Image (cartoon, helix red, strand yellow):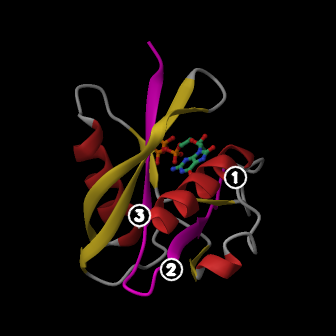
Amino acid sequence: MDKVVVGAAIVDGSGRLLAAQRAEPPELAGGWELPGGKVDPGEDDHTALIRECQEELGVLVEAGEQVGGDWPLTDGYVLRVWLAEIVEGEPEAKEHLDLRWLPMDELYDVRWLPADLPIVRAVQGQLDEG
Ligand SMILES: Nc1nc2c([nH]c(=O)n2[C@H]2C[C@H](O)[C@@H](COP(=O)(O)OP(=O)(O)OP(=O)(O)O)O2)c(=O)[nH]1
């Protein structure tokens, strides 16, 4: 079975998407991603999503619609992504190099990790649909 990474497409009240810049490993450092991480053994996806946002950003999020299905990553991992909004706290880069709130017309101004590009396009499409 595929191993699962969960990611949060966190959107604020102005329709901006939160992008986070990876600090490690060296081959991914500097690239931008959606906050999230690996689902622990025995943990469900939703719990992992909430936990990772708490650990990485110090915020409580509420998950909404899923964005697509299983997005392929390397090494037998898949990435599952949900739209999310912050219900408590201000995001801080606790584990990332930097954070940026990207308005929809600046979505591609950061160097997204390769796996994330189609996901960001899907997020944009889903937000456009309303
Ligand atoms: N969180 C996240 N990971 C992504 C994205 N795109 C992408 O290719 N990945 C890859 C990078 C990593 O190889 C893997 C996630 O691992 P991670 O290092 O964030 O997981 P983790 O926080 O649980 O940390 P660890 O247990 O490996 O220390 O998925 C994304 O948008 N968000």
Foreground label between 1 and 3? 1
Q: Which residues are magenta?
A: 1-24
Q: Which residue lies under the disc numbered 3?
A: 56
| Sooner in the amino-acid sequence: mark 2 or mark 3 | 2
Whether residue 59 appears in this view of the structure is no
- Residue beneath the point at 38% across and 59% down: 83
Q: Which residue lies under the disc numbered 2?
A: 16
What SS does tag 1 mark?
helix
Amino acid at pointer 3: Glu
| Sooner in the amino-acid sequence: mark 1 or mark 3 | 3
What SS does tag 3 mark?
helix
- Residue beneath the point at 27% across and 82% down: 89
From this view, report whether residue 29 is shown above or below residue 40: below
Q: Is mark 3 within 8 Å of ligand 1?
A: yes
Left or right, residue 90 beside residue 127: left
Q: Is residue 33 magenta?
A: no
Locate the N terminus and report the quarter of the image it occupies: top left
Amino acid at pointer 2: Arg
Give the CA distance from mark 2 to mark 3: 19 Å
Amino acid at pointer 1: Leu
Label 1 Cα crowd, 10 Å radius (few <14 / some 14-19 / many 20+): some
Residue 117: numbered disc: 1
- Residue beneath the point at 69% across and 79% down: 106
Q: Are marks 2 and 1 in contact (CB under 8 Å)?
A: no
Give the CA distance from mark 2 to mark 1: 16 Å
Residue 10 placement: quadrant: bottom left
